Image (tube, rainbow, N blue to C red):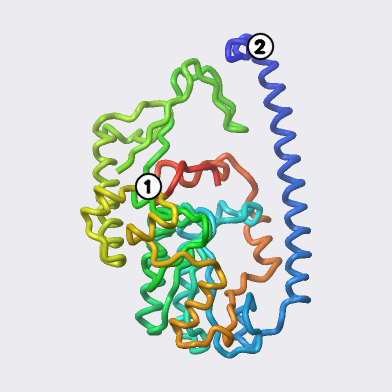
Amino acid sequence: MRNFFSEHPILAVLMTSCLTTVFLSVVSVLLFVAIVVKSFSWLGEQLEMPVSDSSEEYSYIAGSSNSQNKLLSIKIDGVIYSSRTANDPFDFLFPGTTYGYTIKDILTKAAEDPDIKGVILEIDSPGGTINGSRAIYDGVKYFKTKSGKPVLAFIEGIGASGAYMSAIAADYITADHGSLTGSIGVIMGPFKYYNKVISESDFVGSVATENGIEYTYITGGEDKEFGSPYKPLSEKARNIMQQNVDTEYQSFVELVSTDRNISRLDITQNIGALVYENTQAKELGLIDEIKNKHESYNHLANMSGITSSDYQIVGYKENDLWSSIFSGVLSNFYSAETLECRLCNQMLFLYGEPRIF
């Protein structure tokens, strides 16, 4: 196939043009559908949501809507980034993204709110960036110190790597049935090497090579072209990055050891960077109990000195509908940079491989 396109460059250009047109059309349709769906969803929430006595910053989620005892639910879903960037005008099209510094800001405000009696982190995330994960960890620690109120981490599906770092800052960790917990480790990459490039298309970012694409991951002056897909990773660059990864890994291990009271040796030699089902996770000390969501709500209520029938779960309200949709949309559109993998070539607390978006 590669030889065919190299022998018929005009056909390759035409095919690229057609694919680009189709891609842009699909993006436009998705954008329109997302705006319509989000509009109706938001309006429905406003019309149907029970009225809460909470501050206008919070919205009702569950429990007794008339209760004065409010427990704040903070969701940590999908990949964790540090903060929203100018290149994210369409991030609402891709649900399941958490911004660490946004969560930290919410926790900082909640620490000053006397109506909030406790916090539950509802986690379903493979982790993400180091700074984003650490921001959540620091935010939880600040809330606990400033307010003196409890925090419970509830793992609903997966709580791995950076998401687990967020969880260990809590006073208690529960996991829903069938969840996975762990992945105490650091990954860096992928570093791509295009082996003998035949042709490129800057417009759609496609590359044809003679000998394929090589990917390098690091786990645990002369190199200025470091990370370039046109040069394989040098041994010196690999060693330097390994040292960087090892430093972050030791920091991660230290936090887990301190907050979960597990020896460093047990973490590095026994637990490792694997994920574990609930029974194993509990035996290893990674979680405290296996509970479903409502049992976890009740447990947090008990930790907060509240009866299990006299509380309401509230969430922090998102920004205004139209500002959340159009912030940046009018000034940005998809570019090659926007489509780059935001997690690639970074040191990550992530379970699995970095993906686009």
Specify the amino acid type for callout 2.
His
Marks 2 and 1, how far apart at CA: 48 Å
| Residue 241 screen position, x and y as percent | 29, 41
- Residue 134 x %, y %: 38, 62
Label 2: how many Cα within 10 Å (few below 14, some 14–19, many 20+): few
Q: Nearer the viewer, mark 2 or mark 1?
A: 1
Depicted 238 relative to depicted 330: above or below: above
Q: Nearer the viewer, residue 339 or 294?
A: 294
Residue lying at 70% horizontally and 84% vertically, measured from the top left: 51
What residue lies at 74% left-to-right and 58% top-to-bottom?
Answer: 35
- Pointer 1 residue: 274
Residue at the (46%, 17%) spot, across then down: 211
Instruction: Categorize mark 1 by other alpha carbons within 10 Å: few (<14), some (14-19), many (20+).
Output: some
User: At which x and y percent is residue 233?
Assistant: 33, 30
**Of 306 and 1, the residue lying toward us:** 306
Q: Amino acid at mark 1?
A: Leu
Mark 2 — residue? 8
Residue 357 image position (x, y, % from top left):
55, 47
Marked residue nearer the N-terminal end (2 or 1)? 2
